[in-house]
Amino acid sequence: MSIIVKRKTENYASLFKLKLILNGETIGKIAFNEEKEVKLTEDTATLQIKQFSGKSNKLTVTDGDVVEINKGDSILWIFLIAFILMLITSSYAGISWILGLVLSILVLLGLLSLIKVFELKKVNRGAKDNRVQKT
């Protein structure tokens, strides 16, 4: 029993490998544009992806599933908020500027931990569900 995991995150986070988490346990990493077969020990399992403080949705998978990793829709908004915070804090001088920059980074990391940076979705259930029944 196994599933196929495909990473299609475009250029976002392409320099870093993502942790594959199956039923709460880290089982390996997947690189940019990589396709990996993951063995299942049970009929169903819960798959999730994490990188630094970013994470994905939890997806229930079964034997033969093909799962694609994409970037989440919210990531653009987070970087926009971080950019605006850095613009605001750059107008300060001296120690206030440093504190503002540190605060902006902490806000960015906090937002990354709250939202789904990556999205997991099933793209194909595998050959066993696509068979044509003969009559």
Image (spheres, rainbow, N blue to C red):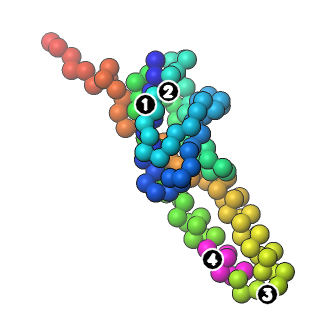
* Residue 113 drawn above or below residue 31: below
Q: Amino acid at mark 2?
A: Val
Q: Amino acid at mark 4?
A: Ile
Q: Which residue is mark 4?
A: 84
Residue closest to the eye, 103 or 122: 103
Q: Amino acid at mark 3?
A: Ala
Q: CA distance from mark 4 to mark 2?
A: 40 Å
Pointer 4 with pointer 1, Cβ within 8 A: no
SS state under label 2: strand
- Residue 13 visible, this angle: yes
Q: Amino acid at mark 1?
A: Ile
Pointer 1 with pointer 2, Cβ within 8 A: yes
SS state under label 3: loop
In this view, the residue farthest toward the right is 95
* Residue 95 drawn above or below residue 10: below
Q: Which residue is mark 1?
A: 4
- The count of marks equals 4
Q: Residue at x 59, y 64 (%)?
A: 78
- Compare marks 3 and 4 and give the one earlier in the sequence: 4
Q: Position of residue 9 (x, y in %)?
A: 46, 51
- Compare marks 1 and 2 and give the one earlier in the sequence: 1
Q: Residue at x 67, y 51 (%)?
A: 53
Q: Residue at x 52, y 64 (%)?
A: 76
Q: Which residue is mark 3?
A: 93
The range drawn in magenta is 83-89
Pointer 3 with pointer 2, Cβ within 8 A: no
- Compare marks 3 and 2 and give the one earlier in the sequence: 2
Q: Which residue is mark 2?
A: 38
Q: CA distance from mark 3 to mark 2?
A: 52 Å
SS state under label 1: strand
Q: Position of residue 93 (x, y in %)?
A: 79, 87
Local crowd size for mark 1, using a 10 Å CA cut-off: few (<14), some (14–19), many (≥20) = some
